[in-house]
Each structure stands twice: as C-alpha cells, then as structure tokens.
Image (cartoon, coloured by chain):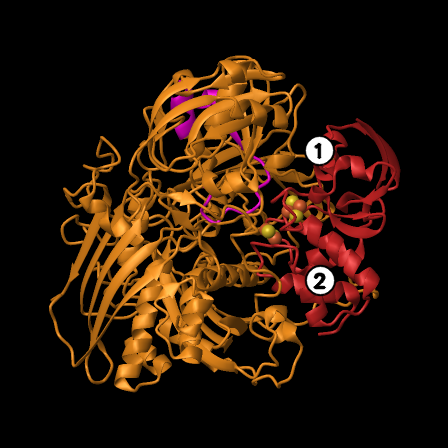
Chain colours: A red, B orange
Amino acid sequence: MRIALVVNREPHEADVWEGESLLFALRERLGLPGSKNACEQGECGSCSVLLDGRLVCACLVLAVQADGHEVITVEGLGDGDQLHRVQEAFLEAGAVQCGFCTPGLVVATVDLLERVPQPSDDEIREALAGNLCRCTGYAKIFDAVRLAAGIQP
Amino acid sequence: MGDGTVPRMHQRRATTTAPARPELELGRVVPAERRLDGVPKVTGQFAYASDLSAAGMLWGHTLRSPHAHARIRALDLSQALAQPGVHAVLTHEDVPGQKRYGLEFADQPVLAFDRVRYYGEPVALVAAEHPEQARRAAARIRVEYEPLEPVADAPRATELPPIHDHRWTHGHGYLDDPRPNVVRSLVIRHGDPDAGGDVSVAGVYELGMQDQAFLGPESGLAVPDGDGGVDIYVATQWLHVDRDQVAPCLGLRPEQVRLHLAGVGGSFGGREDLSMQIHAALLALRTNRPVKMVYSREESFVGHVHRHPARIEAEHRADRDGRLVCVRMRIVLDGGAYASSSAAVTSNAACFACGPYAVANALIEATSVYTNNPPCGAMRGFGAVQTCFAAEAQMDKLAAALAVDPIELRLRNALAPGDTLPTGQRVSGSLPVAEVIRRCAELPLPEPEELPRDAIRLPGGAGNTTRGEGVRRGVGFALGFKNLCFSEGFDDYCAARVRLFENAGGELVAEVHCAAAEVGQGVTNVIAQVARTELGTENVVLAPHTTATVDSAGSSSASRMTWMAAGAIRLACRAAREELERRGGALAGGEIGVERVYRHPRTWPLDPDTGQITGERAHVAFACAAMRVVVEVDAELGLTRVVWIGAAQDVGRALNPQAVEGQIEGGTAQGLGLALMEEISTRGGLIDNASFTDYLIPTALDVPPVESVLVEDPEPDAPYGVKGVGEPPTVVSTAAIASALRDATGRELARVPVRPDDVVGL
Ligand code: FES
Ligand code: FES
C-alpha cells in the first residue's frame, strides 16, 4: 500500500505492507532510524513520536493509520544545527549513556513540558514511567527534565 | 548552555574526598567534557547496530528450538525455500568451518545438530527480502524433534545424566570433579575451615535468573567483501574475541573477518558471547548480499546469556566481640546449557564470597553446572552479586545474634591493605573499606514522610488503594567488593595506536585507534581525555573501533576498560611524543605512527585443589561499595517502595565524576531490579516471561534518589590511579535493599527477587 504523511514538517510517501508499524516505516522506509525499536510491544517508549501532536508509541501504530497525518520524531525536534532545549538538557545533565532510550525520552519530555511547563517531581516520574532506561537509573534524566523546565533544585 | 534561558546544572549531591595518599604522583587528566557521542545520541543520528542498512540488503531470521532438551530427528527445508523472497535457508550442514564456538570453551553449536539443549537454541537460518518473509519462511521449516527429559534442577544436575557427551571444561587446570554436568568446581580452603566461634549463624539463600535487558536488541549487519571475506558491523563488548570465534566457524583466516563496532544499546555482560555474528556472516557469504539481523525483544531474552541463578548455603562463625572466625559457604550456580563464562563466574562467586572482611578461616565450595535451562554467563557483578547477597544477609544475622550495630560489625571486620584474602592473596593496592563504610553511614537518612500522601509515593504506587495505614519503614545496609580486570593468569591487555600528522593548516593532529567497545559507559571520553592530556593538544580524532586497524583492546567488562584503555592510550601517546621530540618537535610534512600494548600487573591461576594463589596474586585489584537504603512496605498488601539510597564507592580516581555517578545510579537500579522484580521464569527449561510485559525492569516510578559519595583513594598500579566503577554498585544494591526489607518486615527474605507473597509471609 502507498501512504502519504508529513514527517518532521516534510511530505513523504512510502510503500508499506499492511501489517507494518509506523515505527518500521519510519526506520526502514523513510530513512529515519532515530525512533528506536527496543520492544515493539508498547512497553518501553523507545519509539515515542508525536502523531498530530499526541505522544504515541510508533510501534503500536500501523503505518497505514498514519496515512494523511503528521508525525514529529526525535530527528525533527531541533532547528537545523540548533538543539532543542530538552536535547541540550539531556547532554548537560549527563542523562545519556548508551542512548538507546534517549530519543523516546526526549520526545516524551518535550510532550510533558508542552503540557506541564513546570512539572513536580511526581509528575515527572509519572510522565516518564512508560519510557524504560536500563543504563542511568533515571536520576540524571529527572535532572535533565528539571533543567529543561528551568526548575531550580 | 549557559545562555541565560536554561540554568546551569545544580551542584550535584555527590562529593569527593581528597586522595588518601597524596604522595602518589599519578597526574591528573584534563577535565571531562560532554559525551563525545552525545549530540548524535540526543538527535537520533547515532547509528546503533539495528539502524544499519546497505544497498541490496537482505534480512536474516533464526529458527529456534521450542524445546529445552530434544533430539533432532529430521529437518525439511523444502517449503521454506519455496517461500517468496527467500534467498537462503541454512542449517548446521552449511557451517563450513568449526561447528562449535564459545567464549572460553567451544561447546556451543553454531546451529544445533543431533540435539537441542535449551529453549531458543538456534537451529536454522533464513535470509529474505523482507524481515516478515524471513519469519514466515522460518515457520515453514519442518523440524522433527524427539523431546528428552530436561535437566532443570541445578542442585540435582550433578546426579543426572550428562547433557553433553564430552567434558568440555575438563583439563583446564580446574579441580577434577568427576560428577556429571559440572562446568567447574572450586574449593577455597583457608586457615582451619573447622575453626569454631562463640556465635554461629546459618542460612540458605537463593537468587533468580536476571536478564541484562539492555534496550538495544542484538543486531548487526554482515557485508561480504567480494573476496571470500566478510565485514561484520555489530554491537558487542569485545571485537577481537568475536573475530577469533567467528573466523574458525566460517573457515576463514582472522584477517578475512573484520569486526566493526556499531552503536551499542547497552550490554551489561550480555554481549560478551556471540549472538548473530556468525549467523549473519553465513547468510551474507552464502547469498553474496549484505544481511542484517535484528532480534525482537522476545528473541533477545533467549539470544544472550543471563545472570546465574544461585543457591547458597552459608555459615558464619564469630567470636564474642563480633570478629569473624570462619566463613563456610556452598554455592551452586546454574550455568544452563553451555559453558559461556560460567567457569570464571564460579571463581568470582567463590573468591568474593566472604565480602570485604578479614577472615582467618574459610571453606568455600562453588560449583557451576550444565542444565537445560537458558545459558548463563556474564552480567554486571559477575558472581560477586550472588555471594554478596548471601554474605550480607549473614552479617545482618550475626549482628542481630550479637546485639551489635550492623554497621559497627562491618567496621570491626573491614578488610584493609596488607590483609590476606581467603585465596592467600595479600591486598597490596587500594581498598579503603572502612572509609567507604564510614562515608556511607554518615549520609543522613531522609525523614519519614507524612501520611496521607499521593498514592504515587506509597508502596506499590497507584496500585495501593489504602491511605498508607499499613506502611512500615525499614533501613538496611550492605557492603560488597569485587575484582577489577581479568584474573587467574589471563593474558589481559589493551592495544592503542596513535598517528600524528599535520592538517591542512599545519596544526598537529593525533588520530587515536583503540578497539575498546563504547557500550554507553563513556570510554570514548576517557580515551580522548587521556590523549589530550598526554599530547597536550585539543586536536584529537578518534578512529572507528575495529579489528581492521589495531590489535585487541580486551573486553568492555570486568570493570576494566577505563583502566586498560587509559593505560594503552597513555603508552602510545608517550611513545608518539618521544618520537616527535626525537625529530626535533616537528613533523616537517611526515607523520608518526606508533602502536603500544598495555598490560596490567600479571596474575596467576588458583591452585585447583586448595583454591590458593600460585603466584603473587590471582586478582589485580579490587573495588568496594557500601549502600544504605530506606524502604517502605505495606506488609498486608505485600507492596514495597524504595524511598532512598545512599552509596559510597571506592572509585580510585574519578576521571569523569558525572559519568561515575551515572554508573552508580544505573548499577544501583539494576540491583534494585534483582531485589524486587526481575526474574526470568522457567518451567522445565522453557522461559515463560520473555517480554517487557512480563519481565519487569525498574521504571522511573521504581528507582529512588541515589545520593553518592565518591571515595577517591588512587589505585597505585593503575594509570592515573583509576578504578573501574561499573560493577560495585550492582554487587551491593540487591543485598542492601533486601536488608532494608528485612528490617521493615521482620522476615528472613532469603530469596530474591522478593515477591509480594514473601513480604506478607505466605
Ligand atoms: S518499541 Fe515501541 S514501546 Fe518499545
Ligand atoms: S541510556 Fe541506555 S537505556 Fe537509557
């Protein structure tokens, strides 16, 4: 099947199998492997993208369901060479180790701060509970979120 | 950053202490900067192994055994070969070289023949145009199995029929143990193992099988070079040891097989053994097309080795003053179907069984066995996790029996440089155990939190429907240590190559080659920091990590890579600088290339009969950590919450304090997982929870704040005084959390992960 969608503000078309996920289409058909594939079962959040501005697991959305819709992935957050402030904060806080969780967490954090510009610690934990990280123990990820939100410790 | 809109990072909670031995002139490296791979990682540009692609690429898929133990009667590939898009279907008959491989012993078939010995064992391979075509074709391969009785109960394995016809680990300088299914037995006899004390405590402890659960699934891309050789781009921990296992199975010379490091999505020991490397190469060489393989999460759970489940019987004897007189332990480790690194894990479990305490007498018996359970091997902490859990529970029991404060009891027995370990080795380097205990104990505990409060901060979180009336608080403490680098006579080295040249602007540039695997720990930053320090230039370029241009770096494991890479880079840089000076300080259009190999101080094997050292040392160096934990439990609902963790760790010298804290926080979280939730559940050898839905790892809701103290006491034998820091927090945190849960519940909790039923006492 042929689908047409807007990814990171650019129109794209792709031929996909009907069973293919949006994640597979992004990674393998559109050359955007930034969204990650740690479980492909909706459990880890490493594939988080914004679909029409809503945070979704791209592994749980069929590629055909995204036909005619708009997707923002981690590759589309910055402005040219300028990092998004959430990306900056992840670097500054040391929230990146292997980095496999990072694209999903960065997208999820962007979504959180859009909805709740000054989240409490509990709100941060709750919002990011669907994004697994195996390396950092989350402490520096929380630091990064607070940093991006301009929350003084 | 620092543009005014975003505040600078707040002062970290972590503190460091001044070196205890300032007379050691070890030199400081230039300060760390942000992660060198940081920008690509936050923008999605970093190429992990699963992100690779090549023109004309096919997808590989592995058909795996649905049985834990079965005889293969027949294989029929005809239907699979007839599927659309399929380019190759391979079995063991298509392995041109050695049919078996292995990290330490080549006991594992590349593709099963005659028998399968574990659930998920690779049987056949398919390459097809689309991954779904490959999966569907694999499902059409007919395998006729004759199921056999699995050996599933590790403590009984030595009485059951052997699962291997050959004794693969026999004759490698280990204790001659004639029982069936033994991978390795090690007995450490120290002093008088029958020495009695005034007080004795005993217990039987068990640990479930933990999974590394790195987020980046096993993946790689094999590209035929058109000349009979192959390039393999893969996420691994040790490129050269992969090459040395892959080449013989392909029937190729080592230089025909080039391993290149692709982005690694975490490893934690789970990438020490091969996964898809030989398989993808076989398919690529057969089809003459690039072949990519990416494991699903379910496949990843059977695609790598796990942490050994253990059963440990322990007895601790002490005098009235609480000084340890004798420790006796019997340890059984379930190695699963193939040896992997079980022999070394056995040794580690035994050598660190007593903990960082001075013990005059000990009898430690450790055995790893073959079973038809999933193969077990390396995972962060490597044997020391299991015995730390038992030993620290015993120390708490001893403290209770003697009515001594548990921290005080540990201080009274703390090991110090100059003391002798149960193997007879004298601690000659840095090991500030008492200091680590004190610094951890000094951390103020958080005040108990008021009730009522948001359910997110109750045990069990939103799943707790009470108002917190059943909440009880507990405080625990634990101490642990382990070795750094490879041990027991292993020739452990790291190579580095430096090329000095002038760029177009006439500036000196250093190109640094080192095959050290960056697995997320940040070793690339260490390499760059050391090169900048030694060469006094900012113009340092890191070449790709590959077997093609430089000798082995050894493994990114055993808390060794920072030490070894720093040693090798320093040697190579100094040699390059000397050469530059010899040339009068200028290259004059030429260039300098030097390769150097760094070795840490030599180690010797343990005596197979006594477990005593046969030379100066069996281990190079040690690192310890202490942890204090506050938990809350709802003793009626069986729910738990870890409220706070305070850690003090012996880090030698922290080259990059933020990264060291990251290792402590992450390592602690993995230990928390083993304490509370992580266990690969098997029935008759079959895994029944191979997904993140059923195998739970800690989330942002489960991990508490970790306050860390970095205790800096430089290691005299290591470059710049560094120590590896990845493993000690994982060694100790499971034990510390269990200790706090015991305090809160009053129950023995002798098995981890602790289940709700155990908390309630069902
Ligand atoms: S890959 Fe989509 S949630 Fe894990
Ligand atoms: S940094 Fe490795 S999974 Fe988060």
Ligand 1 lies under 8 Å from the Cβ of mark 1: no
**Crowdedness near tag 2: few (<14), some (14–19) or many (≥20) residues, C-alpha within 10 Å:** some
Q: Is residue B548 magenta?
A: no
Q: Nearer the viewer, residue B490 or B634?
A: B634
Q: Residue at x 73, y 72 (%)?
A: A120
Q: Is residue B403 visible?
A: yes
- The three-letter code of the residue at mark 2 reads Ala
Q: Which residue is mark 2?
A: A127
Q: Secondary structure at mark 1?
A: loop
Question: Whole-percent x and y of residue B501?
Answer: 62, 34
Q: Residue at x 35, y 40 (%)?
A: B340
- Position of B417 compared to A110: left or right? left
Q: Nearer the viewer, residue A12 or B98?
A: A12
Q: Residue at x 31, y 64 (%)?
A: B205
Circle 2 chain: A
**Which image quadrant is residue A142 in?**
bottom right
Magenta residue span: B245-271
Task: Establish if B551 lies above or below B755.
Answer: above
Q: Secondary structure at mark 2?
A: helix
Task: Establish if B589 lies above or below B301.
Answer: above
The answer to which of marks 1 and 2 sits earlier in the sequence is 1
Q: Is residue B576 visible?
A: no
